[in-house]
Image (cartoon, coloured by chain):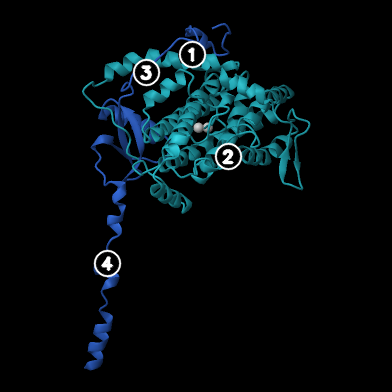
Amino acid sequence: MYGGGYIFDEPNRKQLREEEQHDEPEKLAAFEERIAKGEKIEPGDWMPAEYRRQLIRLIEQHAHSEIIGALPEGTWITRAPGFKRKLALIAKVQDEIGHGQLLYNAAETLGKSREAMINDLLSGKSKYSNVFNYPAETWADVAVIGFLIDAAAIVNQVANAKGSYGPYCRALERICYEESFHLKQGHDVFIELATGTPAQREMLQDALNRWWQPIMHFFGPPDKVSSHSEKLMQWKVKMASNDDMRNQFLDTYVPKIWDLGLTLPDPALRKNEATGRWEYTDPDWDEFFRVINGGGPCNAERLQVRKWAEEHGRWVRKALMRPAERKTFPVA
Amino acid sequence: MSNESLDPRVNRLKLGEAGEIVKVEEGENWNIYEVFHQEKRGAHHEHVGCVHAPDPQLALVFAKEQFGRRKKCVNLWVVKSSDILAFDVEDEDMFANNLEKTYRDASGFKVMEKINKFKQSK
Ligand SMILES: [Fe+2]
Ligand SMILES: [Fe+2]
């Protein structure tokens, strides 16, 4: 699901490293012209080293987010209220794992192996979407995740699907098709609680209150401080600014929440009709950086579960392995 | 771990220490197979993506799970990625070097003009 603000820029990271700007000028010009014309870049094409590096980082973090994102919701599979809800949640969680695999494959076309990506996740070198470092405490959390986190992810993924790298766009096309089911089933759970008993409404309101800040964090730091470069926009790696995506999300979903008589824990949240932009209290960005760097309530558990799965699945992978086979990379 | 997880299944795993290093070896995720999907009988198989698998049989199993679980599907092919031979993308221009190709098209042959001319001359 989760193409969101998981594209985390380490503070002070230089956007374009000096040594990587020495791509051959003619090839670079031809490359940029193709992108400007709306053409897609394919794995065998010439591309600037920095384009490759940024794409690997983007797609890899997106993949990790899908895999880790399945954990908070997966918690509720055994406790889903009713058979249909359980089936739908299993199907959604399976989709998310599938998204992870589609995305790992897309990143592999750029030359980084899936094993290397998994190792970078396990060692903490590679990040994933910050929202999944929070626990899903009640069934209403599943409603908020399925409806609003998936909605936020869709805003980002629909934008990225128009990017310049062919394999990523194709993976996103398939992903977006499945996301529409995630959103719909999440909305259905959300509405059931919102139109239910006072206890159900109270549970949903409590979940909204707890998730609002992580949701506001989802698209990443505000444009005024985030260091997204012009180059990444020009190369169609980054398709929309953090604030523009956040605004688009608020514009579509806040009215749907208010319409049900639910509230959001920010008294300053309102649409400025003159500018068309939403105004809000800045979420606590120190908290965002604290959590993304390992200090959140679930960071340790998420990684430990992944490590457990890798370790305990190893004997199966090894038993099936054919040592004589040489590893190759996907073609498209 | 100090904190109990909300998930009883996670607590049952008795997870190790947070700092512990787990490393996946290169090649441990097997090989890569390209997957081709046939939507209905009589249609072409179309490339849809790839899967990691140790052999073609399991590649088919994973392909069914990954690409056949929702949309209509009647058959799948898998081919090892390294067995696919393709033109170099840099050679793309070789497909565009012949400007005059009407001799290949139905539209390149006009008989009515000749027939009408023949009839008028009678
Ligand atoms: Fe997803
Ligand atoms: Fe999703």
Write down the chain letter for disc 1. A
Q: Position of residue B68 (x, y in %)?
A: 38, 36
Name the amino acid type tagged 3.
Val
Assess disc 3: are there few (<14), some (14-19) or many (≥20) residues with their C-alpha within 10 Å of its C-alpha: some
Q: Residues within 10 Å of mark 1 (few under 14, many from 20)?
A: many
Instruction: For ligand 1, tell me if the residue under mark 3 lies within 8 Å.
Output: no
Q: Secondary structure at mark 3?
A: loop
- Colour assignment, chain B: blue
- Which of the chains bears the disc numbered 2? A
Badge 2 marks a residue whose secondary structure is helix
Q: CA distance from mark 2 to mark 1?
A: 30 Å
Q: Is mark 1 within 8 Å of ligand 1?
A: no
Residue at label 1? A304
Q: Is residue B44 visible?
A: no
Distance of label 4 from label 2 (alpha carbons): 45 Å
Label the cyan chain with its letter: A
* Between marks 4 and 2 in the image, the one whose residue lies nearer the viewer: 4
State the residue in front, A243 or A51. A51
Mark sitting on residue B72: none
A24 on left or right of A243: left
* Label 3 in the same subunit as label 2: no
Q: CA distance from mark 4 to mark 3?
A: 54 Å
The percent position of residue A284, horizontal first and vertical second, equals: 69, 25
Check disc 1 and give the amino acid type: Gln
* Alpha carbons under labels 4 and 1: distance apart: 62 Å
Q: Kindly report the distance in space between the C-alpha atoms of the residues bearing marks 1 and 3.
A: 14 Å
- Identify which residue is drawn at 57% across, 25% down: A130
Q: Which residue matches tag 3?
A: B24
Q: Are marks 4 and 1 on the same chain?
A: no
